[in-house]
Amino acid sequence: MKTAILFESWHHGNTKKLCEAIKKEYDVTLLDVKEDAVELEEYDLICIASGVSFSKFYKEIEQATKDKMPEGKKVFLMYTCGKLGQDFAKNIKKTLSLKKCIILGTYCCKGHDTFGPLKLIGGLNKENPNEDDIQGAVKFYGEIIANFNKGDAPNGNVN
Ligand SMILES: Cc1cc2nc3c(=O)[nH]c(=O)nc-3n(C[C@H](O)[C@H](O)[C@H](O)COP(=O)(O)O)c2cc1C
């Protein structure tokens, strides 16, 4: 089984920390949407991972998903954000469902956020993602692949 994690993480590299922790434990390919060629056909399982901007995944990864995600793929989602409580994956899920992709789960956690005036106070969530958040993502991936063949979705850390 081949897994790719396509990510966009330019604010503080928060989301990238989750991706890199998964790569440390498992055989996955990390694709930075800003640097790497986005070719997803060969992968059996694809993660879309992003920071959140104005309640959505970042623009470039939203666009790459529209343009480059093959139809019918099994997908899971990860994001980091300033404030938990809403489903910031809502928009990307719509794109994926139009492509008949099967969404296996979503993992999210808080990330250091210094957007706008927050900078003046050093930002929110200075310590996040912390070790628990990062290990939560690794565990979540473990559950995703355990359920992969069964087609079950773990609950994830969805708010
Ligand atoms: C321009 C901008 C807009 C943001 N909008 C939101 C938002 O709508 N909701 C939220 O919870 N966090 C928001 N954030 C916080 C980021 O999603 C958060 O810091 C995230 O962890 C950044 O991920 P990254 O370091 O992987 O890029 C925003 C940050 C920036 C820079």
Image: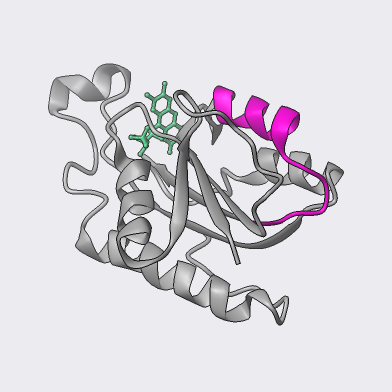
The correct choice, above or below, for 56 with respect to 77 in the image is above
Q: How many marks?
A: 0
**Residue 22 or 50: which is nearer the viewer?**
22
Residue under the point 23% across and 44% down: 125
Residue that appears at 43% across and 50% down: 84
Which residues are the magenta region?
60-75
Q: Image check: 97 left or right of 19? A: right
Q: Quadrant of residue 75?
A: bottom right
* Quadrant showing the N terminus: bottom right
121 horizontally vs 138: left or right: left
- Observer able to see residue 155: no
Ligand 1 shows up in the quarter that is: top left
- Asked if residue 151 is positioned above or below residue 45 in the image, the reply reads below
Taking the spot 46% from the left edge, 74% from the top edge, the residue there is: 142
| Image quarter of residue 76 | bottom right
Does residue 29 show up?
yes
Q: How is the image coloured?
A: one colour
In the image, is residue 90 above or below residue 35? Answer: below
Depth order, front residue of 115/12: 12
Q: Is residue 83 left or right of residue 96?
A: left
Position of 76 with respect to 116 (left or right) is right
Residue 33 in the image: state x and y as whole percent.
Answer: 51, 29
Q: Position of residue 122 (x, y in %)?
A: 14, 29
Q: Measuring from the top left, give residue 9's x and y in whole percent.
A: 39, 33
Q: Is residue 151 magenta?
A: no
Q: Position of residue 10 (x, y in %)?
A: 36, 27
**Image quadrant assignment for residue 38:** top right
Q: Residue at x 46, y 69 (%)?
A: 140
